[in-house]
Amino acid sequence: MSIGSTLGVVLRASRGLALCAGISIVAAACGGGGGGGGTPSAGSPSASGPAAPASLSLTTANGNVLVNWSSVADATQYRVYSSDTAGIDPTGMSYVEVTESPYQISGAANNAALFCVVTSVGAEGEGLPSIEQSVMVAPSAPLKYYPTWYDATPLSTFSYLYEPGQTSAQNGSNLKALIASLSPGDYLEVGGGTYTINSLFDISLVGTAANPIWIVAADGQTPIITRDNASQNTVNMGSGGPCSYVCMRGIEITGGSIALRMYDCDNIWIDKCHIHDCQDNAIAANSVNVNNLTFTENHVHGTGGTGEGFYIGGNFASSIANSCVFAMNHVHDTSGTQGDGIEIKQGSWGNWVAENIVHDTPYPSILLYGTGGMAKNLVERNVCWNSGDNVMQIQGEAIVRNNLLMNGKYGFFSNDHQGTVTDLVVVHNTIINDQFGARMDDWGGKPGMIFANNVVYSELQASMLFNDGSNGVTVEGNVVVGTTGGVGSGFTNGNGLSDFVSASYDATLRNVTPSGTGAMVGVGAQSLVTVDDLNGDIRTAPVTAGAVDG
């Protein structure tokens, strides 16, 4: 089962943004200023045409390549030629014709070289090509989030088909025994059905990068692992010994105390699983140090206890998660006494939280503490709304960029928590809230603090609030609606929700593409611009503030 089939999510590989039902977030594609998109005929360059374009450059992100060049006098159009091999000769080649620079090539082959030249077209025909440039295309989602061993070839393939003549518990016992017997390189396909395992179920298997162990749903089927009570977790990994290089894909896990709990684990990939309706957390890795865990395209909801969808790391760095990926998951309707969507505790470092859709959480949709001086966490391109607390809360030592945050007590909140606020870069986010927009406590005088190129709109309260002042903080290129506090510069005033195509303070409308008259267009700080935007499109000049490029 994929998150797409379960939730009506469209995963656009060329842009990498997961669009969930009710979300409409579309950036204007770069199409060369009003022209292009076709291949009218074969190229025919000659020296009689306009001069060749100079300063050709290629920028890549998310499977896209942005082609830039300098304008040419007497040119009325430009032709963009691209190839996967060097030595482009435009004669006889197809091309895309545009009226001005830049032009974005979308959906290019991941991790492959792309070569490009541009010609000018004028009254005398097509001129000679520019100097050829090349770039290695940055991968798009979801591939960019996968572990390095994602395409390892299995050595042996096994299937377990549900036995209709046996009880759910008997099938569960059979599946448990079969999983325990797996060896490096084994690939187990599990048939659809409900597998009840009331005894302790622990997966402590050790594969290798060359020969990982695969536990996957058979094509078109949904295996459900559950238990009759909450006296134990439904699935443990690594509680009976190390667990490494194991992929679990397409499995539904429900019931129990914690649905999926990870102990002595590294290099684990949980992909396209449905994890829900448990007494405590849905997914926890909070008692033993873990590393290189990858969670992609999972559907997580219906928690209890403290109620976190993801509970990663322990309080005050009692356990640490590093180099983990949390990408393209859908986390919603958590409950319990807290109910954070994704929570990563103090001391955990080098983690990547990207392109998740998180909503309807009692506590913050996404909450990260600090790294204790280790590598920063990266929080980008998440869409979060409807929090009973702060929509996003980040203590420090992180890069927070291109997120959409809507409808909570505070859209964004940051303060000293289990550690000290420090080295926090918050850039190109869009925050829309009927209450407070962004509140930054304890920022004044701290090193490495940046709040720039954000759009922060509050209907009723302050938009930007630095309660301890903003001394030493880089504040540039922001656009606000609502009062500000503790800061006197680094922002301009917006017009209101008319600056967006279709947005509302209560988050029922979430298309935050800048409108034609959007106040955020062209006012961002060039020195702090991000390469891409919320949709994965490469940003172009002049700099548009907020999560979506104009």
Image: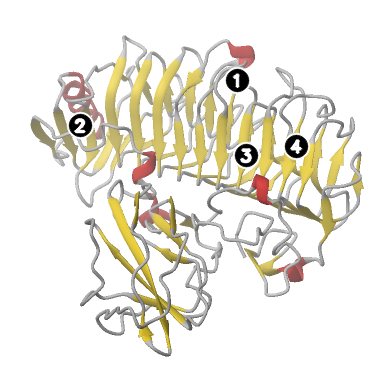
Picture coordinates of residue 332 (x, y %)?
55, 45
Disc nearest the viewer among 4 and 1: 1
Measured Cα–Cα span from mark 3 to mark 4:
12 Å
Picture quadrant of residue 236: top left
The residue indicated by pointer 2 is: 171
The amino acid type found where label 4 is placed reads: Phe
Give x and y (percent) for residue 364.
Answer: 67, 37
Residue indicated by mark 3 = 400
The mark lying in front, picked from 3 and 2, is 3
CB of mark 4 within 8 Å of CB of mark 2? Answer: no
| Alpha carbons under labels 3 and 2: distance apart | 45 Å
The type of residue carrying mark 2 is Asn
Compared to 1, does 337 lie above or below? Answer: above
Q: Indicate the quadrant where residue 40 lies.
A: bottom left
Q: Which residue is mark 1?
A: 371
Residue identifier under label 4: 413
In this rendered view, identify the residue nearer to me: 12 or 470. Answer: 470
Quadrant location of the C terminus in the rendered image: bottom right
x%, y% of residue 239? Answer: 37, 12
Marks 4 and 1: CB-CB under 8 Å? no
Amino acid type, residue under disc 1 in the picture: Thr
Seen in the image, is 290 located left or right of residue 478? Answer: left
The residue located at (71%, 55%) in the rendering is 524
